[in-house]
Image: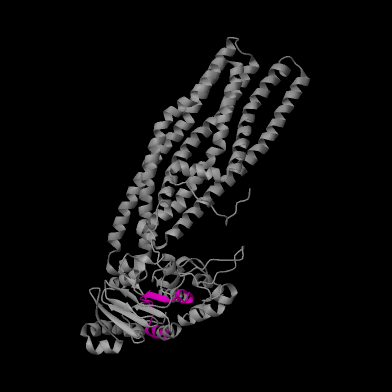
Protein backbone atom coordinates (compact mmCIF):
# COMPACT_ATOMS: atom_id res chain seq x y z
CA UNK A 1 0.00 0.00 0.00
CA UNK A 2 1.47 3.33 -1.10
CA UNK A 3 1.53 6.35 1.20
CA UNK A 4 0.07 9.28 -0.73
CA UNK A 5 1.06 12.60 0.77
CA UNK A 6 -1.83 14.30 -1.05
CA UNK A 7 -4.70 11.94 -0.29
CA UNK A 8 -7.60 12.89 1.95
CA UNK A 9 -6.66 11.78 5.50
CA UNK A 10 -10.33 11.14 6.30
CA UNK A 11 -12.54 12.30 9.16
CA UNK A 12 -10.85 11.44 12.49
CA UNK A 13 -12.70 10.00 15.45
CA UNK A 14 -12.67 12.83 17.99
CA UNK A 15 -14.48 11.01 20.81
CA UNK A 16 -11.32 10.26 22.78
CA UNK A 17 -7.65 9.30 22.68
CA UNK A 18 -8.25 5.56 22.39
CA UNK A 19 -10.80 6.05 19.65
CA UNK A 20 -8.40 8.27 17.71
CA UNK A 21 -5.71 5.57 17.86
CA UNK A 22 -8.26 3.01 16.71
CA UNK A 23 -9.21 5.29 13.80
CA UNK A 24 -5.57 5.43 12.69
CA UNK A 25 -5.53 1.64 12.65
CA UNK A 26 -8.79 1.40 10.69
CA UNK A 27 -7.54 3.85 8.06
CA UNK A 28 -4.75 1.42 7.15
CA UNK A 29 -6.17 -1.85 8.39
CA UNK A 30 -4.68 -4.02 5.58
CA UNK A 31 -1.18 -2.84 6.45
CA UNK A 32 -1.84 -3.19 10.18
CA UNK A 33 -3.21 -6.70 9.63
CA UNK A 34 -0.14 -7.62 7.60
CA UNK A 35 2.12 -6.27 10.36
CA UNK A 36 0.22 -8.26 13.01
CA UNK A 37 0.41 -11.49 10.97
CA UNK A 38 4.11 -11.06 10.17
CA UNK A 39 4.94 -10.24 13.79
CA UNK A 40 2.88 -13.18 15.06
CA UNK A 41 4.49 -15.71 12.73
CA UNK A 42 7.94 -14.27 13.46
CA UNK A 43 7.53 -14.59 17.22
CA UNK A 44 5.94 -18.03 17.03
CA UNK A 45 8.84 -19.27 14.91
CA UNK A 46 11.21 -17.89 17.54
CA UNK A 47 9.53 -20.29 19.94
CA UNK A 48 9.62 -23.09 17.30
CA UNK A 49 13.43 -23.13 17.36
CA UNK A 50 13.61 -24.63 20.90
CA UNK A 51 10.98 -27.19 19.87
CA UNK A 52 13.08 -28.28 16.88
CA UNK A 53 16.20 -28.33 19.05
CA UNK A 54 14.47 -30.61 21.57
CA UNK A 55 13.47 -33.00 18.74
CA UNK A 56 17.05 -32.99 17.43
CA UNK A 57 18.38 -33.89 20.90
CA UNK A 58 15.78 -36.55 21.72
CA UNK A 59 15.46 -38.15 18.25
CA UNK A 60 18.92 -37.63 16.78
CA UNK A 61 21.65 -36.77 19.25
CA UNK A 62 20.73 -39.00 22.19
CA UNK A 63 20.06 -42.23 20.21
CA UNK A 64 22.87 -41.39 17.76
CA UNK A 65 20.62 -41.23 14.68
CA UNK A 66 22.60 -38.99 12.32
CA UNK A 67 19.83 -38.88 9.71
CA UNK A 68 17.28 -37.63 12.22
CA UNK A 69 19.84 -35.19 13.65
CA UNK A 70 20.58 -33.81 10.17
CA UNK A 71 16.88 -33.54 9.38
CA UNK A 72 15.97 -31.64 12.52
CA UNK A 73 19.08 -29.43 12.18
CA UNK A 74 18.16 -28.60 8.59
CA UNK A 75 14.65 -27.69 9.74
CA UNK A 76 16.17 -25.33 12.32
CA UNK A 77 18.31 -23.65 9.64
CA UNK A 78 15.30 -23.29 7.32
CA UNK A 79 13.14 -21.84 10.09
CA UNK A 80 15.93 -19.42 10.98
CA UNK A 81 16.20 -18.23 7.38
CA UNK A 82 12.45 -17.77 7.03
CA UNK A 83 12.31 -15.97 10.34
CA UNK A 84 15.07 -13.57 9.30
CA UNK A 85 13.02 -12.64 6.23
CA UNK A 86 9.86 -12.34 8.32
CA UNK A 87 11.65 -10.05 10.78
CA UNK A 88 12.77 -7.79 7.95
CA UNK A 89 9.28 -7.62 6.43
CA UNK A 90 7.73 -7.03 9.87
CA UNK A 91 10.02 -4.08 10.51
CA UNK A 92 9.41 -2.64 7.04
CA UNK A 93 5.63 -2.97 7.41
CA UNK A 94 5.56 -1.41 10.86
CA UNK A 95 7.71 1.48 9.61
CA UNK A 96 5.05 2.15 6.97
CA UNK A 97 2.35 1.97 9.66
CA UNK A 98 4.17 4.56 11.76
CA UNK A 99 4.82 6.83 8.76
CA UNK A 100 1.18 6.68 7.66
CA UNK A 101 -0.03 7.52 11.17
CA UNK A 102 2.50 10.36 11.37
CA UNK A 103 1.61 11.92 8.01
CA UNK A 104 -2.12 11.37 8.50
CA UNK A 105 -2.12 13.09 11.89
CA UNK A 106 -0.05 15.97 10.51
CA UNK A 107 -2.50 16.45 7.64
CA UNK A 108 -5.49 16.27 9.99
CA UNK A 109 -3.98 18.84 12.38
CA UNK A 110 -2.82 21.20 9.62
CA UNK A 111 -6.14 20.89 7.80
CA UNK A 112 -8.08 21.70 10.96
CA UNK A 113 -5.80 24.64 11.72
CA UNK A 114 -6.54 25.93 8.23
CA UNK A 115 -10.29 25.53 8.77
CA UNK A 116 -10.08 27.43 12.06
CA UNK A 117 -8.33 30.28 10.26
CA UNK A 118 -8.25 33.48 12.26
CA UNK A 119 -10.14 31.79 15.12
CA UNK A 120 -7.10 29.61 15.84
CA UNK A 121 -5.08 32.16 17.79
CA UNK A 122 -8.04 33.05 19.96
CA UNK A 123 -8.56 29.44 21.06
CA UNK A 124 -5.14 27.84 21.35
CA UNK A 125 -1.59 29.08 21.75
CA UNK A 126 1.17 28.69 19.22
CA UNK A 127 3.14 26.55 21.64
CA UNK A 128 0.31 24.02 21.82
CA UNK A 129 0.24 23.62 18.05
CA UNK A 130 4.04 23.32 17.87
CA UNK A 131 4.11 20.72 20.65
CA UNK A 132 1.46 18.67 18.89
CA UNK A 133 3.27 18.88 15.55
CA UNK A 134 6.73 18.15 16.92
CA UNK A 135 6.20 15.76 19.83
CA UNK A 136 2.69 14.35 20.02
CA UNK A 137 2.55 13.26 16.38
CA UNK A 138 5.72 11.20 16.80
CA UNK A 139 4.48 9.69 20.07
CA UNK A 140 1.18 8.66 18.47
CA UNK A 141 2.84 7.02 15.48
CA UNK A 142 5.26 5.10 17.72
CA UNK A 143 2.40 3.80 19.87
CA UNK A 144 0.97 1.98 16.84
CA UNK A 145 3.66 -0.68 17.25
CA UNK A 146 0.97 -2.32 19.39
CA UNK A 147 -0.77 -3.54 16.22
CA UNK A 148 2.35 -5.44 15.07
CA UNK A 149 4.73 -6.68 17.75
CA UNK A 150 2.03 -6.16 20.36
CA UNK A 151 -0.42 -8.54 18.69
CA UNK A 152 2.46 -10.87 17.81
CA UNK A 153 3.54 -10.92 21.45
CA UNK A 154 0.09 -12.04 22.57
CA UNK A 155 -0.03 -14.79 19.93
CA UNK A 156 3.51 -15.96 20.72
CA UNK A 157 2.77 -15.91 24.43
CA UNK A 158 -0.23 -18.18 23.88
CA UNK A 159 1.78 -20.43 21.53
CA UNK A 160 4.61 -20.83 24.04
CA UNK A 161 2.08 -21.62 26.73
CA UNK A 162 0.64 -24.34 24.50
CA UNK A 163 4.07 -25.82 23.78
CA UNK A 164 4.90 -25.75 27.49
CA UNK A 165 1.64 -27.58 28.15
CA UNK A 166 2.94 -30.53 26.10
CA UNK A 167 6.05 -30.61 28.32
CA UNK A 168 4.59 -29.90 31.76
CA UNK A 169 1.14 -28.58 32.79
CA UNK A 170 2.72 -27.03 35.89
CA UNK A 171 5.24 -25.03 33.86
CA UNK A 172 2.52 -24.00 31.40
CA UNK A 173 0.37 -22.73 34.27
CA UNK A 174 3.28 -20.65 35.61
CA UNK A 175 3.87 -19.16 32.15
CA UNK A 176 0.22 -18.39 31.47
CA UNK A 177 -0.31 -16.73 34.84
CA UNK A 178 3.06 -14.97 35.10
CA UNK A 179 2.62 -12.30 32.42
CA UNK A 180 -0.80 -11.12 33.70
CA UNK A 181 0.81 -10.84 37.13
CA UNK A 182 3.48 -8.59 35.61
CA UNK A 183 0.71 -6.45 34.11
CA UNK A 184 -0.91 -6.08 37.53
CA UNK A 185 2.39 -4.93 39.01
CA UNK A 186 3.10 -2.43 36.22
CA UNK A 187 -0.48 -1.17 35.77
CA UNK A 188 -0.37 1.55 38.49
CA UNK A 189 2.89 2.87 37.04
CA UNK A 190 1.30 3.11 33.58
CA UNK A 191 -1.57 5.16 35.02
CA UNK A 192 0.82 7.45 36.86
CA UNK A 193 2.86 7.89 33.69
CA UNK A 194 -0.22 9.11 31.80
CA UNK A 195 -0.89 11.79 34.42
CA UNK A 196 2.72 12.96 34.58
CA UNK A 197 3.05 12.90 30.80
CA UNK A 198 -0.10 15.01 30.32
CA UNK A 199 1.14 17.65 32.79
CA UNK A 200 4.58 17.67 31.18
CA UNK A 201 3.14 18.19 27.69
CA UNK A 202 1.00 21.05 28.96
CA UNK A 203 3.96 22.85 30.49
CA UNK A 204 6.02 22.15 27.37
CA UNK A 205 3.46 23.83 25.12
CA UNK A 206 3.40 26.94 27.36
CA UNK A 207 7.18 27.20 27.32
CA UNK A 208 7.30 26.67 23.56
CA UNK A 209 4.88 29.56 23.09
CA UNK A 210 7.05 31.75 25.30
CA UNK A 211 10.12 30.91 23.22
CA UNK A 212 8.25 32.03 20.11
CA UNK A 213 7.20 35.27 21.79
CA UNK A 214 10.77 35.93 22.89
CA UNK A 215 12.15 35.29 19.42
CA UNK A 216 9.63 37.66 17.87
CA UNK A 217 9.95 40.49 20.39
CA UNK A 218 13.54 40.30 21.59
CA UNK A 219 14.56 43.63 20.09
CA UNK A 220 11.57 45.42 21.59
CA UNK A 221 12.18 43.87 24.99
CA UNK A 222 15.82 44.84 24.87
CA UNK A 223 14.92 48.42 23.93
CA UNK A 224 12.47 48.68 26.81
CA UNK A 225 14.89 47.17 29.28
CA UNK A 226 12.66 44.19 29.93
CA UNK A 227 14.94 41.47 28.59
CA UNK A 228 16.25 40.59 32.04
CA UNK A 229 12.79 40.25 33.57
CA UNK A 230 11.58 38.02 30.76
CA UNK A 231 14.79 35.98 30.92
CA UNK A 232 14.25 35.38 34.64
CA UNK A 233 10.64 34.30 34.03
CA UNK A 234 11.74 31.98 31.25
CA UNK A 235 14.46 30.53 33.48
CA UNK A 236 11.90 29.78 36.18
CA UNK A 237 9.45 28.20 33.73
CA UNK A 238 12.12 26.09 32.10
CA UNK A 239 13.27 24.97 35.54
CA UNK A 240 9.74 23.85 36.39
CA UNK A 241 9.54 22.00 33.08
CA UNK A 242 12.86 20.32 33.80
CA UNK A 243 11.62 19.19 37.22
CA UNK A 244 8.44 17.86 35.64
CA UNK A 245 10.57 16.05 33.07
CA UNK A 246 12.52 14.45 35.89
CA UNK A 247 9.27 13.21 37.40
CA UNK A 248 8.19 11.75 34.06
CA UNK A 249 11.63 10.21 33.69
CA UNK A 250 11.44 8.70 37.17
CA UNK A 251 8.20 6.88 36.36
CA UNK A 252 9.53 5.84 32.97
CA UNK A 253 12.75 4.51 34.49
CA UNK A 254 10.80 2.39 36.97
CA UNK A 255 8.67 0.98 34.16
CA UNK A 256 11.74 0.19 32.09
CA UNK A 257 13.65 -1.25 35.03
CA UNK A 258 10.76 -3.43 36.12
CA UNK A 259 10.06 -4.24 32.50
CA UNK A 260 13.54 -5.74 32.25
CA UNK A 261 14.00 -7.05 35.77
CA UNK A 262 10.64 -8.74 36.42
CA UNK A 263 10.65 -10.80 33.20
CA UNK A 264 14.18 -11.99 34.02
CA UNK A 265 13.07 -13.12 37.47
CA UNK A 266 9.96 -14.70 36.01
CA UNK A 267 11.91 -16.58 33.35
CA UNK A 268 14.51 -17.64 35.93
CA UNK A 269 11.68 -19.15 37.98
CA UNK A 270 10.41 -21.10 34.97
CA UNK A 271 13.95 -22.36 34.22
CA UNK A 272 14.47 -23.43 37.84
CA UNK A 273 11.16 -25.32 37.88
CA UNK A 274 12.04 -27.03 34.61
CA UNK A 275 15.48 -28.07 35.91
CA UNK A 276 13.90 -29.56 39.02
CA UNK A 277 11.44 -31.58 36.93
CA UNK A 278 14.29 -32.84 34.72
CA UNK A 279 16.31 -33.86 37.79
CA UNK A 280 13.29 -35.73 39.11
CA UNK A 281 12.84 -37.50 35.79
CA UNK A 282 9.49 -35.93 34.95
CA UNK A 283 10.81 -34.47 31.68
CA UNK A 284 13.60 -35.58 29.32
CA UNK A 285 16.90 -33.84 28.64
CA UNK A 286 15.58 -32.67 25.27
CA UNK A 287 12.46 -31.29 26.94
CA UNK A 288 14.66 -29.47 29.47
CA UNK A 289 16.56 -27.92 26.56
CA UNK A 290 13.24 -26.94 24.98
CA UNK A 291 12.03 -25.41 28.25
CA UNK A 292 15.16 -23.28 28.42
CA UNK A 293 14.68 -22.30 24.75
CA UNK A 294 11.02 -21.46 25.38
CA UNK A 295 12.07 -19.28 28.29
CA UNK A 296 14.56 -17.42 26.09
CA UNK A 297 12.02 -17.09 23.27
CA UNK A 298 9.42 -15.87 25.75
CA UNK A 299 11.65 -12.92 26.57
CA UNK A 300 10.76 -11.25 23.26
CA UNK A 301 6.96 -11.27 23.65
CA UNK A 302 7.15 -10.33 27.33
CA UNK A 303 9.42 -7.37 26.51
CA UNK A 304 7.16 -6.33 23.64
CA UNK A 305 4.05 -6.55 25.83
CA UNK A 306 5.61 -4.28 28.45
CA UNK A 307 6.90 -1.88 25.78
CA UNK A 308 3.46 -1.91 24.17
CA UNK A 309 1.86 -0.85 27.45
CA UNK A 310 4.43 1.89 27.89
CA UNK A 311 3.99 3.25 24.36
CA UNK A 312 0.20 3.07 24.50
CA UNK A 313 0.20 4.98 27.79
CA UNK A 314 2.17 7.79 26.16
CA UNK A 315 0.31 7.51 22.86
CA UNK A 316 -3.14 7.93 24.38
CA UNK A 317 -1.97 11.11 26.19
CA UNK A 318 -0.72 12.54 22.89
CA UNK A 319 -3.90 11.42 21.11
CA UNK A 320 -6.07 13.18 23.68
CA UNK A 321 -4.20 16.42 23.00
CA UNK A 322 -4.76 16.00 19.26
CA UNK A 323 -8.44 15.24 19.85
CA UNK A 324 -8.78 18.33 22.06
CA UNK A 325 -7.29 20.43 19.26
CA UNK A 326 -9.57 18.84 16.65
CA UNK A 327 -12.57 19.59 18.88
CA UNK A 328 -11.99 23.34 18.52
CA UNK A 329 -14.55 24.97 16.27
CA UNK A 330 -14.58 28.34 14.55
CA UNK A 331 -17.28 30.81 15.40
CA UNK A 332 -20.54 29.63 13.85
CA UNK A 333 -21.40 31.22 10.52
CA UNK A 334 -25.11 31.92 10.59
CA UNK A 335 -25.13 34.28 7.64
CA UNK A 336 -27.97 33.67 5.18
CA UNK A 337 -28.29 36.97 3.33
CA UNK A 338 -26.45 37.68 0.12
CA UNK A 339 -23.70 40.28 0.15
CA UNK A 340 -24.38 43.49 -1.79
CA UNK A 341 -24.07 42.86 -5.53
CA UNK A 342 -22.28 46.15 -6.10
CA UNK A 343 -19.55 47.92 -4.09
CA UNK A 344 -21.32 49.38 -1.06
CA UNK A 345 -20.68 51.44 2.05
CA UNK A 346 -19.05 49.75 5.03
CA UNK A 347 -20.16 51.25 8.32
CA UNK A 348 -18.95 50.65 11.88
CA UNK A 349 -21.49 52.05 14.38
CA UNK A 350 -19.12 51.58 17.31
CA UNK A 351 -16.71 54.19 15.96
CA UNK A 352 -18.85 56.06 13.47
CA UNK A 353 -16.44 55.20 10.61
CA UNK A 354 -18.17 55.14 7.22
CA UNK A 355 -16.19 53.78 4.27
CA UNK A 356 -17.33 55.04 0.87
CA UNK A 357 -16.70 52.52 -1.92
CA UNK A 358 -14.06 53.23 -4.52
CA UNK A 359 -12.08 55.67 -2.36
CA UNK A 360 -8.86 55.64 -0.37
CA UNK A 361 -9.76 56.20 3.28
CA UNK A 362 -7.34 56.67 6.19
CA UNK A 363 -7.91 56.14 9.90
CA UNK A 364 -5.73 58.28 12.19
CA UNK A 365 -5.51 57.72 15.94
CA UNK A 366 -3.00 58.04 18.74
CA UNK A 367 -3.89 54.48 19.81
CA UNK A 368 -3.21 51.96 17.00
CA UNK A 369 -5.34 49.33 18.73
CA UNK A 370 -8.44 51.48 18.14
CA UNK A 371 -7.79 51.50 14.39
CA UNK A 372 -7.00 47.78 14.16
CA UNK A 373 -10.18 47.08 16.13
CA UNK A 374 -12.19 48.95 13.51
CA UNK A 375 -10.49 47.01 10.70
CA UNK A 376 -11.24 43.73 12.47
CA UNK A 377 -14.89 44.69 12.83
CA UNK A 378 -15.19 45.77 9.20
CA UNK A 379 -13.46 42.55 8.13
CA UNK A 380 -15.71 40.50 10.42
CA UNK A 381 -12.97 39.16 12.62
CA UNK A 382 -14.69 40.26 15.81
CA UNK A 383 -18.43 40.38 16.59
CA UNK A 384 -19.93 43.79 15.90
CA UNK A 385 -22.90 45.68 14.48
CA UNK A 386 -20.94 46.66 11.36
CA UNK A 387 -22.95 46.78 8.14
CA UNK A 388 -22.19 46.42 4.47
CA UNK A 389 -24.67 48.22 2.29
CA UNK A 390 -27.16 48.35 5.20
CA UNK A 391 -26.84 44.56 5.65
CA UNK A 392 -25.31 43.45 8.96
CA UNK A 393 -22.01 41.73 8.25
CA UNK A 394 -22.94 38.90 10.63
CA UNK A 395 -25.91 38.04 8.38
CA UNK A 396 -23.74 37.59 5.28
CA UNK A 397 -22.07 34.17 4.79
CA UNK A 398 -18.46 34.36 5.87
CA UNK A 399 -17.22 32.91 2.58
CA UNK A 400 -18.69 35.88 0.72
CA UNK A 401 -17.09 38.34 3.15
CA UNK A 402 -13.69 36.67 2.82
CA UNK A 403 -13.97 36.55 -0.99
CA UNK A 404 -14.37 40.32 -1.26
CA UNK A 405 -12.87 41.91 1.87
CA UNK A 406 -9.20 41.39 2.77
CA UNK A 407 -7.70 42.41 6.11
CA UNK A 408 -3.95 42.67 5.49
CA UNK A 409 -2.43 41.73 8.84
CA UNK A 410 0.88 43.60 9.35
CA UNK A 411 2.27 40.47 11.06
CA UNK A 412 0.79 37.92 8.64
CA UNK A 413 2.86 34.74 8.39
CA UNK A 414 5.32 34.33 5.55
CA UNK A 415 5.93 30.70 4.68
CA UNK A 416 9.21 29.30 3.41
CA UNK A 417 9.56 28.93 -0.36
CA UNK A 418 10.54 30.85 -3.44
CA UNK A 419 9.88 34.58 -3.33
CA UNK A 420 7.18 34.25 -6.00
CA UNK A 421 5.41 31.57 -3.93
CA UNK A 422 5.70 33.70 -0.78
CA UNK A 423 4.05 36.61 -2.59
CA UNK A 424 1.33 34.44 -4.05
CA UNK A 425 2.21 32.74 -7.34
CA UNK A 426 2.70 29.05 -6.52
CA UNK A 427 5.46 26.96 -8.02
CA UNK A 428 4.31 24.04 -10.11
CA UNK A 429 3.85 21.04 -7.82
CA UNK A 430 3.87 17.31 -8.77
CA UNK A 431 0.13 17.31 -9.28
CA UNK A 432 0.11 20.32 -11.58
CA UNK A 433 -1.56 22.74 -9.17
CA UNK A 434 -0.70 24.71 -6.10
CA UNK A 435 -2.34 26.76 -3.40
CA UNK A 436 -1.96 30.50 -3.25
CA UNK A 437 0.29 31.45 -0.33
CA UNK A 438 -1.51 34.64 0.63
CA UNK A 439 -2.47 36.41 3.80
CA UNK A 440 -4.27 34.37 6.44
CA UNK A 441 -7.60 35.64 5.15
CA UNK A 442 -6.80 36.17 1.47
CA UNK A 443 -9.97 36.24 -0.61
CA UNK A 444 -10.68 33.65 -3.24
CA UNK A 445 -10.21 35.21 -6.70
CA UNK A 446 -13.58 35.83 -8.30
CA UNK A 447 -14.24 34.62 -11.85
CA UNK A 448 -12.54 36.98 -14.25
CA UNK A 449 -10.73 38.77 -11.45
CA UNK A 450 -7.29 37.40 -12.26
CA UNK A 451 -5.85 34.29 -13.91
CA UNK A 452 -3.75 31.65 -12.24
CA UNK A 453 -0.56 29.77 -13.01
CA UNK A 454 1.81 31.15 -15.61
CA UNK A 455 -0.69 33.89 -16.60
CA UNK A 456 -0.22 35.46 -13.14
CA UNK A 457 3.22 36.86 -14.09
CA UNK A 458 1.89 40.30 -15.20
CA UNK A 459 -0.21 40.58 -12.04
CA UNK A 460 2.78 39.56 -9.92
CA UNK A 461 4.95 42.19 -11.59
CA UNK A 462 2.28 44.84 -11.07
CA UNK A 463 1.88 43.93 -7.38
CA UNK A 464 5.64 44.04 -6.80
CA UNK A 465 5.79 47.42 -8.55
CA UNK A 466 2.91 48.83 -6.49
CA UNK A 467 4.68 47.76 -3.28
CA UNK A 468 7.96 49.29 -4.50
CA UNK A 469 9.60 45.89 -4.05
CA UNK A 470 11.53 45.63 -7.35
CA UNK A 471 14.81 46.31 -5.55
CA UNK A 472 14.18 43.28 -3.32
CA UNK A 473 13.81 41.05 -6.36
CA UNK A 474 16.92 42.52 -8.01
CA UNK A 475 19.02 42.12 -4.86
CA UNK A 476 18.30 38.40 -4.49
CA UNK A 477 20.62 36.00 -6.35
CA UNK A 478 17.86 34.18 -8.26
CA UNK A 479 15.26 36.90 -8.26
CA UNK A 480 11.73 35.57 -7.78
CA UNK A 481 13.06 32.01 -7.73
CA UNK A 482 15.25 32.68 -4.67
CA UNK A 483 14.37 30.53 -1.67
CA UNK A 484 13.14 32.59 1.27
CA UNK A 485 13.25 31.32 4.87
CA UNK A 486 10.15 30.93 7.01
CA UNK A 487 8.80 34.34 8.14
CA UNK A 488 11.33 35.79 5.65
CA UNK A 489 13.92 35.97 8.41
CA UNK A 490 16.61 36.52 5.79
CA UNK A 491 14.96 39.82 4.76
CA UNK A 492 14.86 43.11 6.65
CA UNK A 493 11.77 44.42 8.40
CA UNK A 494 11.03 46.90 5.64
CA UNK A 495 11.48 44.25 2.96
CA UNK A 496 9.09 41.91 4.75
CA UNK A 497 6.53 44.70 5.01
CA UNK A 498 6.68 45.37 1.28
CA UNK A 499 6.44 41.64 0.49
CA UNK A 500 3.29 41.42 2.63
CA UNK A 501 1.86 44.46 0.85
CA UNK A 502 2.65 42.97 -2.57
CA UNK A 503 0.95 39.75 -1.51
CA UNK A 504 -2.18 41.63 -0.47
CA UNK A 505 -2.23 43.70 -3.68
CA UNK A 506 -1.81 40.59 -5.84
CA UNK A 507 -5.20 39.30 -4.68
CA UNK A 508 -6.80 42.58 -5.86
CA UNK A 509 -9.68 42.44 -3.35
CA UNK A 510 -12.74 44.60 -3.73
CA UNK A 511 -12.06 46.01 -0.25
CA UNK A 512 -8.53 46.18 1.21
CA UNK A 513 -8.13 46.97 4.92
CA UNK A 514 -4.50 47.46 5.96
CA UNK A 515 -2.90 48.55 9.23
CA UNK A 516 0.33 50.57 9.07
CA UNK A 517 1.51 49.08 5.73
CA UNK A 518 4.58 51.37 5.55
CA UNK A 519 5.63 51.83 9.19
CA UNK A 520 9.03 50.12 8.67
CA UNK A 521 9.97 52.10 5.53
CA UNK A 522 12.13 55.18 5.17
CA UNK A 523 10.47 58.38 3.94
CA UNK A 524 11.64 58.08 0.33
CA UNK A 525 10.42 54.48 -0.09
CA UNK A 526 7.22 55.30 1.77
CA UNK A 527 6.45 58.17 -0.62
CA UNK A 528 6.96 55.83 -3.58
CA UNK A 529 4.66 53.21 -2.05
CA UNK A 530 2.01 55.86 -1.30
CA UNK A 531 1.91 57.06 -4.91
CA UNK A 532 1.91 53.60 -6.42
CA UNK A 533 -0.63 52.22 -3.96
CA UNK A 534 -3.10 54.96 -4.79
CA UNK A 535 -2.66 54.34 -8.53
CA UNK A 536 -2.91 50.55 -8.17
CA UNK A 537 -6.11 50.77 -6.10
CA UNK A 538 -7.79 53.42 -8.24
CA UNK A 539 -11.55 52.81 -8.21
CA UNK A 540 -11.24 50.13 -5.48
CA UNK A 541 -12.08 50.54 -1.79
CA UNK A 542 -8.95 50.88 0.35
CA UNK A 543 -8.74 51.65 4.08
CA UNK A 544 -5.40 52.37 5.73
CA UNK A 545 -4.77 52.76 9.45
CA UNK A 546 -1.77 55.11 9.50
CA UNK A 547 -0.37 58.36 10.86
CA UNK A 548 2.22 58.97 8.14
CA UNK A 549 1.64 62.33 6.37
CA UNK A 550 2.98 60.77 3.16
CA UNK A 551 0.09 58.29 3.12
CA UNK A 552 -2.51 60.67 4.53
CA UNK A 553 -1.81 63.25 1.84
CA UNK A 554 -2.81 60.71 -0.82
CA UNK A 555 -6.05 59.71 0.93
CA UNK A 556 -9.44 60.85 -0.36
CA UNK A 557 -10.95 60.84 3.13
CA UNK A 558 -9.29 60.91 6.55
CA UNK A 559 -11.10 60.01 9.79
CA UNK A 560 -9.47 61.39 12.93
CA UNK A 561 -10.32 59.09 15.86
CA UNK A 562 -10.27 60.07 19.51
CA UNK A 563 -10.92 57.34 22.07
CA UNK A 564 -12.03 55.04 19.26
CA UNK A 565 -14.67 57.47 17.92
CA UNK A 566 -14.65 59.68 14.82
CA UNK A 567 -13.81 63.20 16.01
CA UNK A 568 -13.35 64.80 12.61
CA UNK A 569 -13.51 63.88 8.93
CA UNK A 570 -11.98 65.57 5.90
CA UNK A 571 -8.91 65.60 3.72
CA UNK A 572 -5.46 65.59 5.25
CA UNK A 573 -4.89 69.28 4.54
CA UNK A 574 -8.33 70.27 5.82
CA UNK A 575 -7.72 68.50 9.12
CA UNK A 576 -4.27 70.04 9.46
CA UNK A 577 -5.87 73.47 9.28
CA UNK A 578 -8.89 72.79 11.50
CA UNK A 579 -7.89 70.11 14.07
CA UNK A 580 -5.03 70.92 16.49
CA UNK A 581 -5.04 67.39 17.91
CA UNK A 582 -4.75 65.90 14.43
CA UNK A 583 -2.03 68.35 13.50
CA UNK A 584 0.00 67.51 16.61
CA UNK A 585 -0.35 63.78 15.98
CA UNK A 586 0.70 63.72 12.32
CA UNK A 587 3.36 66.44 12.78
CA UNK A 588 5.07 64.22 15.35
CA UNK A 589 5.02 61.38 12.86
CA UNK A 590 6.42 63.66 10.17
CA UNK A 591 9.34 64.60 12.44
CA UNK A 592 10.05 60.93 13.06
CA UNK A 593 9.99 60.29 9.31
CA UNK A 594 12.44 63.14 8.61
CA UNK A 595 14.80 61.79 11.25
CA UNK A 596 14.64 58.35 9.69
CA UNK A 597 15.28 59.77 6.23
CA UNK A 598 18.39 61.60 7.44
CA UNK A 599 19.80 58.85 9.63
CA UNK A 600 18.85 55.54 8.00
CA UNK A 601 19.35 53.98 4.59
CA UNK A 602 16.38 52.89 2.51
CA UNK A 603 14.99 49.53 3.55
Magenta-highlighted residues: 503-528
Name the residue located 52 percent from the left edge and 50 percent from the top edge: 102
**Residue 200 horizontal/vertical position (percent):** 37, 46
**Residue 164 horizontal/vertical position (percent):** 59, 20
The quarter holding residue 222 reads: bottom left
Nearer the observer, 226 or 12: 12
Residue 500 visible: yes
Q: Is residue 37 left or right of residue 582?
A: right
Q: Is residue 392 left or right of residue 176?
A: left
Q: Is residue 326 above or below residue 94?
A: below
Tell me if residue 170 is in the magenta stretch. Answer: no
Nearer the observer, 244 or 316: 316
**Residue 115 horizontal/vertical position (percent):** 45, 59
Name the residue located 34 percent from the left edge and 52 percent from the top edge: 238
Q: Is residue 164 left or right of residue 251?
A: right
Q: Is residue 380 above or below residue 582?
A: above
The quarter holding residue 48 reads: top right
Q: Residue furthest right?
A: 67
Q: Is residue 87 left or right of residue 395?
A: right
Screen quadrant of the C terminus: bottom left
Residue 518 visible: no
The quarter holding residue 554 reads: bottom left
**Residue 85 horizontal/vertical position (percent):** 67, 38
Amino acid sequence: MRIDAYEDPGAPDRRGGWRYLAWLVRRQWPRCLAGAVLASVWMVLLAATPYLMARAVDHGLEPGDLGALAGWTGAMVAVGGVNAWLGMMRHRTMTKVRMDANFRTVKVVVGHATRLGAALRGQVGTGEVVTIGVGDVQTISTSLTAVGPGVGAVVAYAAVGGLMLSVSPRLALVVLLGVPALGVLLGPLMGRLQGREAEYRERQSVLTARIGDLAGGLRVLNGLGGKGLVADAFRRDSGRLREQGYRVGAVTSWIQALGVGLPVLFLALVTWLGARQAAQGHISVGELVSVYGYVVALGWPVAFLIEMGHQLSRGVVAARRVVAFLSLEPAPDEGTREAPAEPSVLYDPASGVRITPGRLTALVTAHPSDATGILDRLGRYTPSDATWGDIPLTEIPLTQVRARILVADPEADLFAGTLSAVIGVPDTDPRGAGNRATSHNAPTPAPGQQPTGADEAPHLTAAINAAAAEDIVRALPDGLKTQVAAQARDLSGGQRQRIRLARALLTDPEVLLAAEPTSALDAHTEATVADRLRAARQGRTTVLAATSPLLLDRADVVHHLVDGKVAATGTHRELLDSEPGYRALVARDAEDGEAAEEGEPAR
